[in-house]
Image (cartoon, coloured by chain):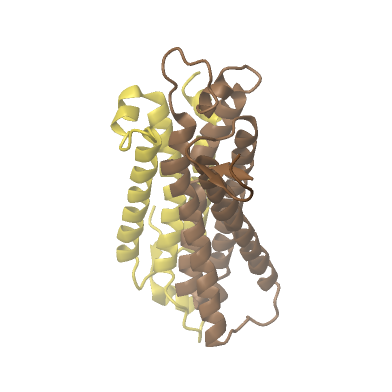
Chain colours: A yellow, B brown
Amino acid sequence: MNLSRSESAEQAATPGKHLLPNGPAAAAILSAGAGCTFIGLIALAADASKPIAKLLTLYLPTGPLSGVSSVAILLWLGMWLILAKRWKGKTVALGKVNATAFLLLALGILLTFPPFADFLQGK
Amino acid sequence: MEITLRALVTMIHGMLFGAFFLMATFGLVVELTRSSFGEQPLRLTPRGYSLERFYLFTIVALGWAAVLTGAYIVYPWYRAVPPAGATDLALYPKYVLMSSATTAGWHTLGMEWKEHIAWIAPVAMSMVAYIFTTHRRLMREQPKVRQAVLVFALVAFGAAGVAGLFGAMLNKYAPINGGSTIRLTGKNQ
């Protein structure tokens, strides 16, 4: 999905008005949505697989939750950093970014809901 | 009047960090909704902007403090495994809940949802605070930015609400206790 479009095209749509590039904000929005999905996906993986759960046990008293949250946060921040660099000074199609971010956010919430995670695992 | 160390830390986690995060997030949602109906964009004095930044920074700090204390201090007490043959499970809340079919759901649904959904709140609120503080003009110019900020703030509020509700209920059915006793008032017996 190509979310970028030229800033001049955006300005042409609203003549006489200089719009600020929305790339950095869009990067924050999209990566936050993805971050929520990462939490749900990694939690599901840890719940479904004992070896993954063991691998994610970074701090024994907390158990796999320590790895689930740490890995998800690192992925979220990494994605934010990469997108912010790529979209610096650019204007992107914010409607698509929002729609994708909301979808990822909803998916993340759904994946954290135990009955849904159990359903996906056939429990 | 006394309280155990674990109960005190659990209270700080839930009632200080968690509850204040919830209240502050609700305040932000109200303000975001209210300001979207304004005829003129609200402009603050430099002092007003710095107070607003402080408010946002505090919300984010409270959110991260709540999940970090929860995951790394309170949760290990909750999920501690009792020694073989233990009959008194008072210090093992997870096992208290799992020992009865009528309370097991508080763990299998409540704690298992809470321990993951709670992390969504500070992630979402960090993004909200970042855009609020660094892209304020963009929020005024492009309503879609404001829309995203409002949705994520609402989700942060909802996620913290779920975590808070289950946290309160879990602590009701299987309170976290133990550690040294702190005397608040009165004399030793």
Please state the horizontal and vertical placement of residue B85, each as a whole percent of the image: 45, 12
A31 versus A104 height, above or below: below
B158 versus B178 height, above or below: below
- Viewer-proximal residue among A57 and B148: A57
B60 versus B53 height, above or below: above
Please state the horizontal and vertical placement of residue B140, each as a whole percent of the image: 56, 76
Residue B125 visible somewhere in the drawing: no
Please state the horizontal and vertical placement of residue B113, each as a whole percent of the image: 54, 35
* Count of numbered circles in the view: 0
Q: In the displayed structure, does residue A65 sit left or right of residue B14?
A: left
Q: In the displayed structure, does residue B22 sit left or right of residue B129?
A: right
Residue B126 visible somewhere in the drawing: yes
- Viewer-proximal residue among B128 and B95: B95
B170 versus A99 height, above or below: above
Q: In the displayed structure, does residue B159 sit left or right of residue A48?
A: right
Q: Residue at x 34, y 39 (%)?
A: A67
Q: Residue at x 60, y 84 (%)?
A: B43
- Viewer-proximal residue among A17 and A113: A113
- Furthest toward the top, the residue is B85
Please state the horizontal and vertical placement of residue B165, each as a whole percent of the image: 64, 42
Q: Residue at x 50, y 41 (%)?
A: B6
